[in-house]
Amino acid sequence: MTAKGVGHPGTCVVCGSRLKRNGTTSAGTVRWRCTECGGSSVKRRPDVVRAAQLDAFVSWLLGPSRQFEHGRSARTFRRRHAWCWNVDPVITVTGEVYDQVQLDGTYLNDGWCLLSAINGDGDVIAIQWTDEEKTASWKALLERIPAPRVVVCDGGPGLASALAECWTDTKIQRCLVHVQRNVRGYVTMNPRTEAGKGLRRLSLALTKIRAREQAADWLVALNAWHQDYKGWLDERTTATDPGAVRPTWVKATATSWFTHDRARKAYHLMARLAARGHLFTYLLEKFDGLGIASTTNHIEGGVNAVIKTLLRMHRGMTSHHQRRAIEWWAYLHSPAPKPSSSLIRPEHWQPASAPRPTFDDTTMIPGGWGATLTAEEGLWARTGWAGRTR
C-alpha cells in the first residue's frame, strides 16, 4: 500500500507497474519499489532542488556565511551552484508616482559605475550600469521611472541635463551635504580670511535648518555677506603687478584674473542654488508632511555603503559576479520582490552550448606540400654520423 501524505513518483519506468513505498535512501529520501520487476526509484523534483540551491546561493551571496557552511565543501558548493550565476534578477517598475526619489551614483573598483534610485522608504526602484555618470546613462534610468514630485540629488552635470529632459515638472532638492563639501573644497576646512570663514559658517549652517523662518534668515545672512565682501570678491590681479604669480588655472594669454577666485566660486555656488530654489525645496509648504529629505544620506549610507561592504565580504569575485551580486541585493531590496525561485528558467541551469567550429583540413595544407611521406620528415632509418652505432 502506498503511504498517504508522501508524493508518489508515478509508475515504474521499466515495466509500468505500480510502486509501493520501500523505506528511505541513505540521504533520507523516500524509496519506491516496483511490485513486478523489483526496480527501485525515488521521486525526482528538479524544481524543488533548483529552488533550494538558488536560495542557498543567495543566502551565501548576500550574507556573512562561507561556502562550506552550505554543503559538504566549498568546492562542492561552487560546482552545484555554478548555474545560479546565470539567474538575472530584474527590478519590476510598478509605475507608482512617488513623492520623492533619491538619485546617486557610485564607482566600483573594476571600473563600473552603478546609478541607483530609491523611494522615500529606502526601497531600490531602479538601477543602471554605466562607465560614468553621463547624461545618456541617467536618461536610461529616469525614463523607466514615473516622474516624482521631488528629486533629491547631488550636483552632477550629467544628471542635471537628464533631469531637464526627462523630469521637467519635478522639483529639485540639492543635497545640502554635497553643497557643504563643495564649499569646503573651495575655501578649505580652516580658511585664513574672514570672508572665507564666513562662507564656511554659512555652509555648515545649511544642514541645521529645520523651518522656513530659519531658511529665510540664512538667505538674509548670505546676502549680507555679499554686501560686505562684494568689493573684495571683485578684486583682480594683473600680470604686471609687482610680485604677481600667475595661477596654473589662468590662461597664458590672460592679462588679469580674480584674486579671490575660489571664494567667488563658493559664494556663487550657494547663491545660484538659492536663486533656483534648489536649497530649501524640502521646506515648501505644499510638501509639508511628506518627509522630503534634504540630503542623499539615505541612498549613500543605505545603498552605496552596503554594496561596497558586500563586495568586501566576497573579495576576488570577477567583474561579472560582482555586478550580479549587487543586482541580487538591489532586487531583494526593491518594493515588491518575487520569490527567488520564480526567476528560474530552464536556460539558467541548462544553457545552450555554443556550436563547435568546423574546419576543413585541406585548407590548412600549403599548396606546395605533398601528401606522401618523405625521408626529410625523419620517418626512415638514418645514415651517416647520426645513425652510427658504437
Image (tube, rainbow, N blue to C red):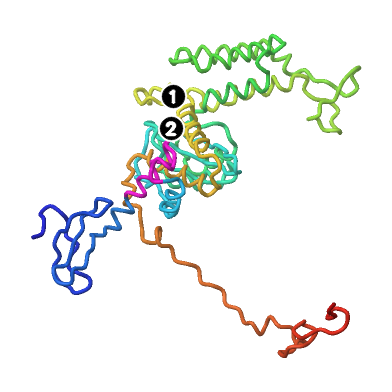
Q: Is residue 56 left or right of residue 271?
A: left
Marks 1 and 2 in Cβ contact (< 8 Å): yes
The stretch of residues the image draws in magenta is 52-72
Element at label 2: strand
Q: Is residue 139 left or right of residue 269?
A: left
Percent x, y of residue 266: 65, 21
Which is nearer the eye, 153 or 60? 60
Q: Is residue 287 above or below residue 167?
A: above
Q: Is residue 16 above or below residue 270?
A: below
Write the residue at 91% across / 22% down.
240
Percent x, y of residue 270: 59, 22
Residue 150 - label: 2
Q: What's under tag 1, amino acid-wise?
A: Tyr
Circle 1 is placed at which residue position?
282
Q: Quick check: is 362 in the magenta stretch?
A: no
Q: In which quadrant will I find the C terminus? A: bottom right
Residue density around tag 1, few if under 14, some if 14–19, many if 20 or more, within 10 Å? many
Q: Is residue 224 left or right of residue 3?
A: right
Q: In which quadrant will I find the N terminus? A: bottom left
Residue 380 - label: none
